[in-house]
Image (tube, rainbow, N blue to C red):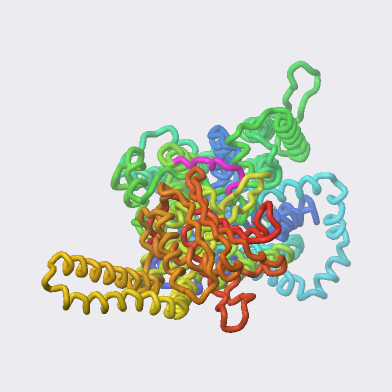
Amino acid sequence: MTFNIFEIALISIAYLVVLFGIAFSADKGLIPQKLVRHPIIYILALGIFASAWAYYGVIDLAFQFGYGALAYYLGTGALFLFAPVAIAPLVQLARRFQIGSLADLLVFRYHNQAVGVMTTACMLLASLPLLALQIQAIADTLQILTFSSSEPLPAVFSNWSFREVMALAYCIVLVIFTILFGSSRENHPGLIVAMAFETLIKVVALFAVGLFAVYGVFGGIEGLDQWLFDYPENLELLHSPIKDGSSHTLLLVFLATAVAMPHIFHMSVVESPLHQITSTLSWAFPLFLLLMALPIFPILWAGFELGVPLPAQYFTIGIPMAAESASLTILAFLGGLSAATGAMISLGLALSTMLLNQWILPASRLERGDKLYRQLLWLRRIIIFTVFALGYAFYQILDNELSLTHLALMAFIETLQFLPGIFAVAYWPTANSRGFLTGLSLGSLVWLVALFIPALTDISQLPIPGTEYILPVGIEHWSNITLISLGLNVVAFVFLSVFTKTSVEEHYSAELCAEDELSHPLRMILDVHSAGEFTERLSSSLGKTTARKEVNKALEELNISGHDRRPYALRRLRNRLEANLSGLMGTAMATDILNRHIPYHLPEAKGTADINLIENRLTQYRSHLTGLAAELNNLRLYHRNTLEELPMAVCSLGQDMEILMWNHAMQQLTGISAESVAGSHLEDLKMPWRQVLKSFSESPIPHLHKQQLNLDDGPHWISLHKANIAGPVANIADGQVILLEDMTETQLLEQELVHSERLASVGRLAAGVAHEIGNPITGIACLAQNLKYETDDPDAAQETAEQILSQTNRVSRIVQSLVSFSHTGQQEKAEFMDISLRDCAEEATQLLSLQKEKTQVQFTNLLPDNLTLRADSQRLIQVFINLLSNARDASPQDSEIRIEGELQGDSVLFTVTDEGSGIPPEHQARVLEPFFTSKDPGEGTGLGLAMVYSIVEEHEGQLELVSPVPGQTNGTQIRIKLPRQLETEG
């Protein structure tokens, strides 16, 4: 059964047109995004892993190794089964740092550009057999389908075989498709959907052939069992190869393919539309591999039963041809075509990215401005064409001398050499670039000499210099060559990594890779202060236009304003820029550009954590935390919510004065939202909060009471308290927590109480004032009467008038003192000015001397005349009145109350000492409390000393009570210390 070449060509072109249409529709949004981003689409797209070898060649593998062929599925399936451990760390790294290829990942980990160059070279050599495998499979199946076709080739291809022409045409079509849908820097949903469609076709085709083999050839499961019973040698063929050690080597080889093959890495990481897929991958992809494995042995046995006159590797298409089923034959061919096409496209894209980032860009000079994007696009297109051309050239050189199995093994053995280095990325921080490069070089050299070169020549033996031993080489000895190359690789890698020193940069990269997405919370320092500075600095390398486009693109992706000056926002902007530039020109070049123009600086203190970054990541990954991690996160949220909902305003600061937390009460008090200040510096706050918080955080004082601030809604009094936050390093603080207590209501109430106390004092003074005013009024009346009779004596009249004025002034002074005293405490803010402490005490004693009915004592003012300070005079008069009044009430008749003072540096110390009975010890701790009094009911309000203490606090002073007086057995001494220079509040 054969087909006309034009029929096959028409079917192939129709299939590729459908593939083009699907990719185009997805890219243009014609296919619903819900379908495009569905996990099933992504799982199917990963089916590019099952290339033409998995569709055709694995049948030959089953023929040669029996059940050992299952190693292909078991090795890869096991790796994906443990995806959260084996693959997730690599995926997280790739996403965090926008790593676009396996070479970029290894360069990032080992911090050495030579690693990228070497990785790209080895991957290119390893991929040539794999590319040739896909081309050979398509060319062979086309020849099989059209074997008896007598259609002559065009004259231009007269020296070419039919197989070579079909292979060339196939490569040209794939080059066009890959350039159209994969050469730009963006992710391509169309490419993902197209690869998923191809996987669906090959799975359906393989199952259709498998079902036909079971039910069409053997008549069902019972018929197959009977056939195996009748021909037991077929079962024995499956078991006997297991006794050979090659089966275990197969498992080792296929174990590495899932992470080391560049196109698998490209599809699973670079083109992935999902952010959290590892949990789905761990069961979905192994299930996909199981489905692919089910038809393998039935197809092999059906080929034996039908006597298909083809190699075992082409039984998949030979069975429907032998059964004369045209439709099934076409379906089988399309399945193989889809398997080869998916692998070729993804492999071409992966290799082009590696070649561009690791070879071309570091060695070329890029244009600036808009030309940069065009230059990179054309470079990618040229490299894609070159990769396919190299694959086709290698296919031509081999000239079908190797089977699909041999080509696959050759490719997989070389990619196996990367397994030690990839394992060390996340799980061995001690590994270094010297060990990796040496191990990879030795392993690849053995592979090159023992497998690659013999495939191109007739070499079958290789003498080892200096010995008589001859090493057999060639694909027939692949098992021994695999173990030797990998063994030398591992030994060199481990030895040099252990016994050579790792650079500081490489050690830092190793720590990054060894940590997960929630780790590495170090708060780095940037010396830029705006997005505009990013553009200016990057212009020298990217050009002004390109730099502006990249900065604006990063700002839009992060939803950050271009005017945002917060350090945390700028750090996020830098990280996003590095990620985007990595996707554009590779990790190595992007890192170099950012490190040169916008470098990070380590904080001065060790272990300075980036709290905002940790909070952001924990919020994103909260639903994915389990076990102890979830419990710890819940505990964190509990404490975080406690601080957020605390009715007292709280903010926390880093060592560099970066705001790390700003709770709800702080937002209400300041009118500043947490979103606008989190991650910013105190310097960026608006006034007056910038001055208040900055000065307090820098001062050594842990508490600051009743600072007056003039806000939009009027004056507020704020008390501030702070404490250092212990860091991970002993005796070093990692920051501060500042509490703001709104004392406005309390202050206003205290002012009212002070005023009430003064009015009460006015009432107590009223009798003395009336008596004191009565005397001069009586004198004025007598003098006025005498004045009537002294009109003839001008001198006597003048003297009488002067006496009247003197008595009137005396009345005015008494009334003014009383009025001033009664009004004090109602002012909105304290006015501090230079005052004499002696004058304040003198006025207080004069007011108290008006109360004739009280115990008569002698007030002795011993304060020096030059004892001055900046303070509120009326409030200090209140202090003296309250202290002297209490002292008088506690003193015996005719005793002395002394007022003394002195300078002590920048402070003034004054004391009020009486000769009373003293304060009992049990009362000393409570006398400063409001409303506490030891006097009889109606004799005192209990507010006097409380007011004194409040006024002293307002003046940033200290009050000390000593009873009995030192050196005596009785008496009480009040000691008050006030700063000399105090600025007006507010």
Horizontal side, residue 115 vs residue 68: left or right: left
Q: Is residue 601 magenta?
A: yes
At a point 73% along the width and 37% down the height, the residue shown is: 486
- Image quadrant in which you'd find residue 569: bottom left
Q: Which portion, as a residue range, is magenta?
A: 599-608
Q: Quadrant of the N terminus?
A: bottom right
Residue 887 in the image: x percent, y percent? 57, 66
Residue 33 in the image: x percent, y percent? 46, 72
Residue 83 in the image: x percent, y percent? 68, 58
Residue 609, can we see it?
yes
In the displayed structure, would residue 370 be above or below residue 712? above
At a point 47% along the width and 74% down the height, the residue shown is: 851
Closer to the camera, 573 or 895?
A: 895
Horizontal side, residue 794 vs residue 152: left or right: left
Closer to the camera, 963 or 854?
A: 854
In the displayed structure, would residue 655 be above or below residue 212? above
In the displayed structure, would residue 801 be above or below residue 461? below
Residue 337 in the image: x percent, y percent? 54, 59
- Image quadrant in which you'd find residue 976: bottom right
